[in-house]
Image (spheres, rainbow, N blue to C red):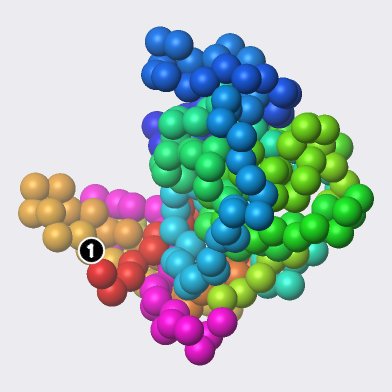
Amino acid sequence: MTRHGVLLAALITLLSACAQQSTQPVTGDAKRPTQDGAPTATLDPSTIVNAKPRHELLKLAGNMSPYTVNGKQYHLVEDHRGFRQRGTASWYGTKFHGLPTSNGEIYSLYEMTAAHKTLPIPVYVRVTNLNNNRSAIVRVNDRGPFHSERIIDLSYAAAVKLGFADQGTAPVEIEVIEPDNSQSAAPTARYYLQVAAFAQRASALNLEQSLRQRLDLPVTVAVNNDPERVLHRVRIGPFSDFPAVQAAKRQLQQSWNGEPSLIVEDDH
């Protein structure tokens, strides 16, 4: 596993605990609670504002697939558009407040965010508490919860808004929602699967030819701009979005045993 993969797995494992009620404040790492729980301040659910869906690129950070936690392997959802799921929601709070999420952002228990095992990061999800029919919109930016009976781990604020912070868990339905295209232009990106990188151009061309013969996908060789270490990268793509590159990855793995790397090139 690469260093990035080891770091991601460690972060995923760290952020996988579920929430239990507590009143310990977060005042720094030296005094970080050993048990997870709620902050001392009381939140008014009527003042908690939903996450506002906007167009965001799905990049490598947090989107390793497959990944392994506690000996179990997880694959990201190939096409998250229209994704729905029912199950149990939990929440996490003070113990993880201020720590990195799986995509490197900093977790805040006061923001409307969530962790999911297999949805790409970031996506926006409408969560409905089936006990009281309250709904909230959250932004998925983390991995978990790694309990078989739980499908989503919400921030403390989201749990308060949904009315189950005191109970710890609740039956929910989640639904991925897409931003309104009329509100903002979607950012553009080019998605690739990098299969291998060679110092020798001939080796890269041989693999390119082999893949072209086996796949109905665009295969190219790209050369980096480092004169001290020239690499010839065999890549499949470009693809216009994350679902398309995930579908290409599945096709690739039917005839090739390696694990490709996701490459995202945007215009910024």
Q: Tell me what residue is drawn at x 44 percent, y 58 percent.
A: 59
Instruction: Pick out the residue farthest to the bottom.
Output: 182
Is residue 121 found left or right of 36 in the rendered image?
left
Instruction: Pick out the residue farthest to the left.
Output: 227
Is residue 187 found left or right of 250 in the rendered image?
left
Q: Quadrant of residue 220?
A: bottom left
In the image, is residue 222 above or below residue 155? Answer: below
Q: Which one is in front, 163 or 180?
A: 163
**In the rendered image, is residue 151 in sight?**
no
x then y, percent, for residue 261? 45, 53
Q: Tell me what residue is drawn at x 73 percent, y 72 percent.
A: 82
> How many numbered marks does the figure carry?
1
Q: Is residue 193 magenta?
A: yes
In the image, is residue 105 above or below residue 214? Answer: above
Q: Tell me what residue is drawn at x 40 percent, y 32 percent.
A: 3
Q: Which one is in front, 224 or 114?
A: 114
In the image, is residue 15 above or below residue 190? Answer: above
Span shown in magenta: 180-202
The residue pinned by badge 1 equals: 223
- SS assignment at label 1: strand
x then y, percent, for residue 252? 59, 63
